Amino acid sequence: MARIVMKFGGTSVGDIERIRNVARRVKTEVDAGNQVAVVVSAMSGETNRLVGYCDAMAELYDTREYDTVVATGEQVTIGLLALALQTIGVDARSWTGWQIPIRTDDAHGKARILSIDTTILNERLALGQVAVVAGFQGLGQDNRITTLGRGGSDTSAVALAAALKADRCDIYTDVDGVYTTDPRIVPRARKLDRITYEEMLEQASLGAKVLQTRSVEMAMKHKVRLQVLSSFVDMPGTLVCDEDEIVEKELVSGIAYSRDEAKVTLMAVADRPGVAARIFGPLADNNINVDMIVQNISADGKATDVTFTLPRGDLSRALRVLEAQQDAIGYQRLISDKGVVKVSVIGVGMRSHAGVAQTMFSALSEKGINIQVISTSEIKVSVLIAEEYMELAVRALHTAYGLDAA
C-alpha cells in the first residue's frame, strides 16, 4: 500500500465528463489499495472569469476580497469531484484550504505556504476515505482566505505530499510527460523517463510550462518524488526525482525557451563604484526582477554600457523607474527592445563535461544567429537572441546535442 497525492489541472477537470474521468482514475488507485489525496484546480477558464469580475468591479481592488472571489473556482471543483467519486462507490469528501487548514502568510494573491495540519487528513486516509482538496488556496495569519498565485495548485499538491509524507505526487495535465523541448517546435523531441529536480527547476524557470517553478523548488527541498502524467491517455509519464536515482545522466536533457523577455541597455554610464546599486536598487524596490546582465567597459575605462533582461510585462514600469533615476545613475542614453527571446541548454551532465557552451555557440553561428547576451549556471547556458530566430535556434540546438528521436 502506498500513499499518493494526485493533482489534476484545469483542463483535466474542464467539464462534467472530464471530472468523471478523473474520478475513475482515482478509483483505480483506491482499488489498488492505496491511500489517496486529490488536489484539483478550478475548471479551465474559471479563474480567468473570476479575475475578470474583480477587474471590472474596481481598478485598485482589496486583494483580500480578490482572494475570496477567485478561491471559489476550486470550491466548485472539489465538490463535484467528491460527488463523482461517491457515485462510483468511493468514500470521499471535499476540503477547502481553510478547513484543513493550510496556513499561509498574509501576502494575498501570492501567498506562501507556512504549514499544513494533516491530523484529520491522516485519520481519514487511514480509514480509506479519499480527501479531495482545493488547490491554490489557504488560510492567512489574519484568518482570511488566501491564494497562492497563478499555477499555485501544483505548489498545493507538492506541499500536501510533503506534509502527508506521501510516497509520490502525481501531476496530471494535458501533456504526457516532460520532453527534451517543445514538440510543437521540434516534432522529434523525446519524452524523458526521468529528470532531476535541478533540471526540471531550470526548465520551469526558463520557459517550460509543464510544472510551476515554486512546486519544483518545494519538491526538491522536501525530496517529494513527482510524476508528470496525462489525464487523457493511459501511458507512463516522466518522474522528477533526485539525481542519485538516475543511473546514466544525459549531457543535456533539454532545450527551453522564453518569449517573455525584454532587453534594456544603459549607454555611457560613468564607471565608478556604486553605479550598479543605483541601477538595480530602484528596480528591486519596484519588484522588477532582472535576469541576464552584461557590462561592457569603454576603451578609456571611464564609461560602461550596461545591458540586462527582465520580464516583458515589466518593461514600461522599468523604463519609468530608470528615467526618473537618470541623474543619479549618470547614463547618456536608454535603449529598450521587446523583440528578443531567451534560449537555454540544460543538463546535469554539464558539471563533468567540457565544451557544452562551445557546441551551443557553434550551432547558432552555423545558422547565422547572433548572440546578444550570455548567462550560465552550473547546469545551464542561456543566450538572448532576436525573436525571429527562436524556432530555428531551438531546432538547431536540439539536433546539435543529439536529442532528436530516432
Image (cartoon, grey):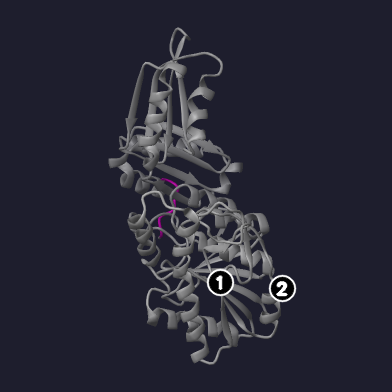
* Chain part drawn in magenta: 400-405
Give the mark nearer the N terminus: 2 vs 1: 1
Q: Is residue 404 magenta?
A: yes
Seen in the image, is 189 located left or right of residue 351?
A: left
Q: Could you say whether the residue bearing mark 1 is in a helix, strand or loop?
A: loop
Name the residue at the left extreme: 388
Q: Could you say whether the residue bearing mark 2 is in a helix, strand or loop?
A: helix
* Residue 258 x %, y %: 40, 46
Callout 1, which amino acid?
A: Thr
Q: Is residue 312 visible?
A: yes
Residue 176: mark: none
Q: Nearer the viewer, residue 380 or 364?
A: 380
Callout 2, which amino acid?
A: Thr
* Residue 35 x %, y %: 64, 80
Q: Which quadrant is the N terminus positioned in?
A: bottom right
Give the residue at mark 1: 96
Q: Is residue 269 magenta?
A: no
| CA neighbours of label 1 inside 10 A, class few (<14), some (14 to 19), many (20+) | many
Q: Which quadrant is the C terminus positioned in?
A: bottom left
Please say if 405 is above or below 122: above
Residue 119: mark: 2
* Residue 394 x %, y %: 37, 47
Name the residue at the top extreme: 300
